[in-house]
Image (cartoon, helix red, strand yellow):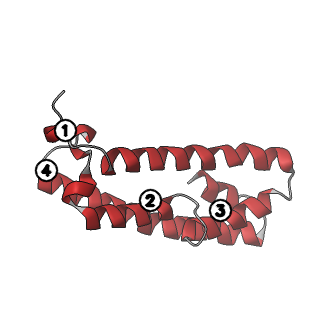
Amino acid sequence: MNFALFGLYSNDTSGLQGGIYIVLTHGITSSILFIFVGFLYSKYHTRSLNFYRGLIHTYPAGVFFLFIFTLGNVPFPGTGGFNGEFLVFSSILNYGWFYASIIFIPIIVSAFYSFYIFTRVSYGLPKYMEFF
């Protein structure tokens, strides 16, 4: 959401359009991811990530949709997040490379964090299947 604020305060039409686009796509993808978490909670009755490991073994279709919406949550090309963040990033480049490099760091950190959580939840052996 910091990109949306950067876009809204960039005093550029492409930055403003990108900020609004980020807000709309973030609302859709985050809502779907929260619905998915609610579905998992209603099925397993726990919020501990240790019990969600190996979800590909029990719910492969859910893992597919989780992957698609995780890609939508990070700025991956072809998704709404990429379009909005590209517009904001191009408008921030008008102010200089220093500001653009500072706001590029959260993109990388959020992508690593999102994919780390996705792989931890989706793959590996479930907790009840481990012996040690």
Q: Residues within 10 Å of mark 2 (few under 14, many from 20)?
A: many
Q: Residue at x 55, y 71 (%)?
A: 80
Determine which quarter of the picture holds residue 90: bottom right
Q: Residues within 10 Å of mark 3 (few under 14, many from 20)?
A: many
Q: In this rendered view, identify the residue nearer to me: 31 or 74.
A: 74
Q: Identify residue for label 1.
A: 127
Q: Residue at x 83, y 44 (%)?
A: 98
- Callouts 1 and 2 close, C-beta under 8 Å: no
- Callouts 4 and 3 close, C-beta under 8 Å: no
Determine which quarter of the picture holds residue 19: bottom right
Q: Identify residue for label 4.
A: 44
User: Which label's residue is closer to the chain start, 3 or 1?
Assistant: 3
Q: Identify residue for label 2.
A: 70
Disc nearest the viewer among 1 and 4:
1
* Quarter occupied by the C terminus: top left
Helix, strand or loop under label 3: helix
x and y percent of residue 101 in the render?
77, 46
Q: Residue 85: which disc?
A: 3
Amino acid type, callout 3: Glu
x and y percent of residue 46 in the render?
16, 44
